[in-house]
Image (spheres, rainbow, N blue to C red):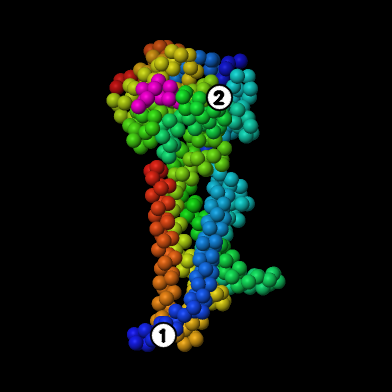
Amino acid sequence: MAFLSIHGLTVSYGGKADVLRDVSLEVERGEVIGLIGPSGSGKSTILRTLVGLLKPRAGTVTLDGTKVDYGSRGSLRAARDRFAIVFQQYNLFQNMTALRNVAIAPTLVKKRGRATVEEEARALLARVGLAEKVNAYPDELSGGQQQRVAIARALALKPDILLLDEITAALDPELVGEVLDTIRALQKDGMTMLIVSHEMAFIREVASRVAFLDQGSVVETGPPAEMFDRPNSPRLKEFTSRILRH
Amino acid sequence: MWDQILEDAPRFFGPWNLLFLGEALVNTLLLSYIGAALGFMIGFGLAIGRHPRLYGILPVRLAATAYVEVFRRIPFLVKLMCVFFAFQLSGTQATLFTVALVTVVLSAAAFAAEIARAGIEAVPAPQWDAAEAMNFSRWRVLTRVVAPQSWRVVLPPLFGYAVGFIKSTSIASQIGVMELTYAAKILNTRGFSALLCFGTILVLYFLICWPTKRIGERLEARLGRRAKA
């Protein structure tokens, strides 16, 4: 079985129509999966469901051979221990410095020594090019800088799988590059990632496989070159022609 | 009139009266501060118990909501009477001071619960998402992320109400609690001019309320400084 195996995942918000319908996806270690599709197709919902911010109505998630039971606190904790998610709006804690944002979960939740963790946090912030900003608060940083702090915060958790939820969508165009460079470096290091993005050129470059979602279902999966150049399904054809025209 | 006041003053501020007023002042202070402190703690507890993303299980939420909505809408005097008769009916021996203190606590808890709820809701959902996804326990989401960002919203109205409770304690004079207003009434009936009696407690009330407001502003400046959400 694959490292992360999602099978028949179905999610609905409070009695309304399913936002995810019978989604299945296999992710191997070191793979980078690009999740693409029109707005509202359920891409972000997959990531939010994996970290337990939404409860699946049906389906199974198996991580490294262990089934995740989202109804059980212990099982959810174990799963959250191995995922890290970066949000579109960065979601940095506003009451903490960049360094504290990165160091808080490892010290508080994973109970590691503060000195070691802070040393690592400084190294991570340096790696995303923010060595000088360790003591800055989120409101003193640009969107691109905040997003890089958020990536450093996710990496400090030493996740098995990194989930990136439209991390460049809220950024000014000139700040997108710095964030994407950080992700490219992670891909080279062999980090397993699920990337939701509208940056098609970037997905094409870093993803080993792409899944196209529409109306809550996976319509087509395949290597990026095939998906973008020779789409099979009519809906993907329409989507790529609309996206690539710009 | 001034002549009479000037003539009365040395006798009014005699040692016995000062002791009497001092005791009344202590009672007002105890009612206000212990009442508000206990009430705010219970109120915060209620707000936490009501919140669906914290500890809010349905029966607790319903009970807390009912309590908050009802107690915020009953006049202080009516609450005071209810507590008074509740103690009588239960046959518990309680001093009038205890009755007044319980009323202040019940009242403060309801208002604080509502203020704290607004403070918690002022913290955007994405802050919760990030903390929960990183395996923060509910207690840690509250203490490390939500509460520090809530103070800015919570403190100004909270201290506004604290000053309000200090003033409400004067209503306890209606059931004969020996606090400032009651003391003034007694001194007045002993023949001292009303202006002197009530003028004196007016100054004393101000001397309690004003520093309270200042403490609030100080806390606000300190705790709210780094929480521009």
Give the quadrant of the C terminus of chain B.
top left
Estimate how packed mark 1 is, as few (under 14), some (14 to 19) or many (20 or more) residues with alpha carbons within 10 Å. Answer: some
What amino acid is at disc 1? Asp
In the figure, is residue A154 to the left or right of A75? left
User: Front-most of A127 and A16?
Assistant: A127
What amino acid is at disc 2? Arg
Q: Say the numbered circle drawn on residue A58.
A: none
**SS at badge 2:** loop
C-alpha distance separating marks 2 and 1:
80 Å
Letter of the chain that mark 1 sits on in the rendering: B
At horizontal 50% and vertical 70% (from top left) the residue drawn is B25
Give the x, y percent position of residue B143.
52, 43
Residue B113 covered by magenta stretch: no
Estimate how packed mark 2 is, as few (under 14), some (14 to 19) or many (20 or more) residues with alpha carbons within 10 Å. Answer: some
At horizontal 50% and vertical 27% (from top left) the residue drawn is A115
Q: Say the numbered circle drawn on residue B8.
A: 1
Region rendered in magenta: A121-132
Give the x, y percent position of residue B208.
44, 65
Q: Is residue A149 visible?
A: yes
At horizontal 45% and vertical 47% (from top left) the residue drawn is B150
Q: Residue furthest right?
A: B91
Kindly identify which residue carries mark 2: A82
Q: Is residue A170 visible?
A: no
Residue A112 sits in quarter: top right
